[in-house]
Image (cartoon, rainbow, N blue to C red):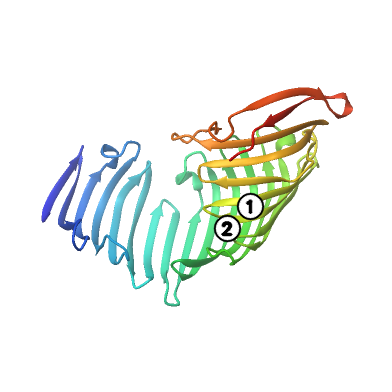
Amino acid sequence: MTQARLRLGDGRADLRGRIELGGAQSVQLSGSFKNLDLAQLVRGLDTHLNGTLDIDGRLRKPFTGRARFALDESRIAGRAINGRGTLETGDRRLDADIELRSGASRLTALGGLGAGRDLKLALVSPDVATLVTGYGGQVDASATVWGELDAARIDGTIAAKNLQLPGGHRIASAVAAFRGGLAAGEPLAITADITGHSSSTGPQASIAGATLVVRGTTASAMLELTGTTAIQQPIRIVAHGGIKDQAWRGSIAAVEVGAPLDLLMRTSTSLMISADAVSLGPAEFSLRGARFHDSSCIGATAGGARQDASKSCSRRHWTPRRGRRGASCAAAQATACH
């Protein structure tokens, strides 16, 4: 291809260059686009793009090349966006110089990875509602990424105020600090605090304050969440585990939630969380004085909805019995997840 024009509805892209899928497997492409709506190609991808693009690189490993872009008076998912950026790869290194703006919000990435360099990331958003539908509040986040491409490390902080979340949840303040890396033995440290959480269902489901502490390594860390509800009831969760085979694998050692749930985990239980499934159990809990046993697998459908993963947990039967304080309860005995 030496020159081409793509028309999508009222928009168009004027491109020139060359794409070689065989042999060198390379791309050299530059051009401009005006009122480009990619929803004409990909359903649900709402865009209104104006700008320029310049790409020169290799399509096979090791990937090398350079890409430049500029956006002006554009919109993505109904949000105004302007910006420019350069991304370059080669010789086990990555270099970036990117700035994107949407209203008063600003995202930047500057620096690189490999060869002793570091990459600095920053997001400042006085009003998250201008970025994400259904959310609100102020967010200020920054991070530094360093190391080699296949063993990167990250150190960052997040601070948020007056957060508004789907389902009528609000959080007055949230702060977090994290430090970790991709390698299994890399030290991992995370602390997070929230205060002033309120739920639309009332103070029983609201959290006055909570603290999360994670210490260990990427492959093996201890997690402890402690807090108090708005009606001064305790919350405590303790778990241990780490990342292995593209999933978090470990165990929950303790769960305690005060009134009105009066939830208590009576035995430790295994837990696995991956991108497409969650496996829990077998576990024994007491809820408002009633005991129950459970072993569950939850999977993700192609549409993103969550449901029982019937292929790995195919049978479940319930046995009524009497629990503490005379409360009726059911014991759910399920097949183990595999």
Judge from the rendering whether residue 292 lies leftward or rightward of residue 150; answer left or right.
Answer: right
Q: Which residue is mark 2?
A: 158
Judge from the rendering whether residue 174 lies leftward or rightward of residue 260; answer left or right.
Answer: left
- Could you tell me which residue is drawn at 77 percent across and 43 percent down? 267
Give the number of the disc on residue 174.
1
The kind of residue tagged 1 is Ala
Q: Secondary structure at mark 2?
A: strand
Judge from the rendering whether residue 286 lies leftward or rightward of residue 195; answer left or right.
Answer: right
Classed neighbour count for the residue bearing mark 1: other residues with Cα under 10 Å, few (<14), some (14–19), many (≥20): many
- In depth, the one of 189 and 49 nearer the eye is 189
Which of the two labelled residues, at mark 1 and mark 2, occupies the earlier sequence position? Answer: 2
Classed neighbour count for the residue bearing mark 2: other residues with Cα under 10 Å, few (<14), some (14–19), many (≥20): some
* Location of the N terminus (image quadrant): bottom left
Q: Is residue 285 above or below residue 194?
A: above
Q: Farthest left residue?
A: 2
Q: Is residue 241 above or below residue 196?
A: below
Task: Give the x, y percent position of residue 234.
Answer: 79, 44
Task: Give the x, y percent position of residue 107.
Answer: 44, 58
Check contact, mark 1 vs mark 2: CB within 8 A: yes
Task: Give the x, y percent position of residue 4.
Answer: 13, 50
* Location of the C terminus (image quadrant): top right
- In depth, the one of 99 and 322 nearer the eye is 322
The kind of residue tagged 2 is Ile
- Could you tell me which residue is drawn at 44 percent across and 57 percent down? 106
Q: Secondary structure at mark 1?
A: strand
